[in-house]
Amino acid sequence: MSDFSENVRKAYELYLLGNKQEALSLLIPGTKHHYYLTIIDAIKRERHTLSKDTKDLIKQFRANFYDEDSTRLVLQELFLRYDGAKSDEERDQVIKELDSTFVYGYYNHTKPAEVKKKKDVKGKSADEETKPLDLNSVFNEE
């Protein structure tokens, strides 16, 4: 949101200082900044369960101003829903929604059964080479 006019900057300052109604009155309804502050305020008030009006505002904002700010709001709403989920089914539903909307790729590769650990030239397996380093023997020279 780099297109700040002096009026918009003042509205954001007022909002951050706690005077929300005056901040929203400075902005023109229907503009990107008015939508954004209204939605942020609603998300802060409603927390884990957003009202139908707030969800509609997010949809309108996303339809009118499809950019990284609208994506951020959608992600914030999904993360709050995940935090407020009362069951594993609700969490799984949010994860599926995140996956279908924001993840572009499939990561369900299963390792074939016939693949075995490869030994290196020294005859050590990968597990033997990745053992934790004994720091006492390294730093305590005798």
Image: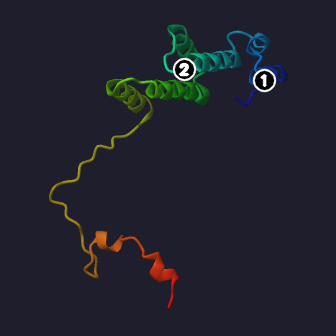
- Provide the residue designation for mark 2: 47
Could you tell me residue 26's position as x and y percent?
79, 13
Q: Crowdedness of circle 1 by 10 Å Cα count: few (<14), some, many (20+)?
A: few
Q: Is residue 60 above or below residue 105?
A: above
Q: Crowdedness of circle 2 by 10 Å Cα count: few (<14), some, many (20+)?
A: some
x 41%, y 37%: residue: 104
Q: Which quadrant of the structure image shows residue 106? A: top left
Q: Quadrant of the N terminus?
A: top right
Q: Is residue 6 above or below residue 126?
A: above
Tell me which amino acid carries mark 1.
Leu
Tell me which amino acid carries mark 2.
Arg
Secondary structure of the residue carrying tag 2 is loop
Left or right: 70 with respect to 82? Answer: right
Could you tell me residue 129's position as x and y percent?
34, 74
x 50%, y 21%: residue: 48
x 47%, y 26%: residue: 78
> Is the C-beta separation of discs 1 and 2 under 8 Å?
no
- Provide the residue designation for mark 1: 17
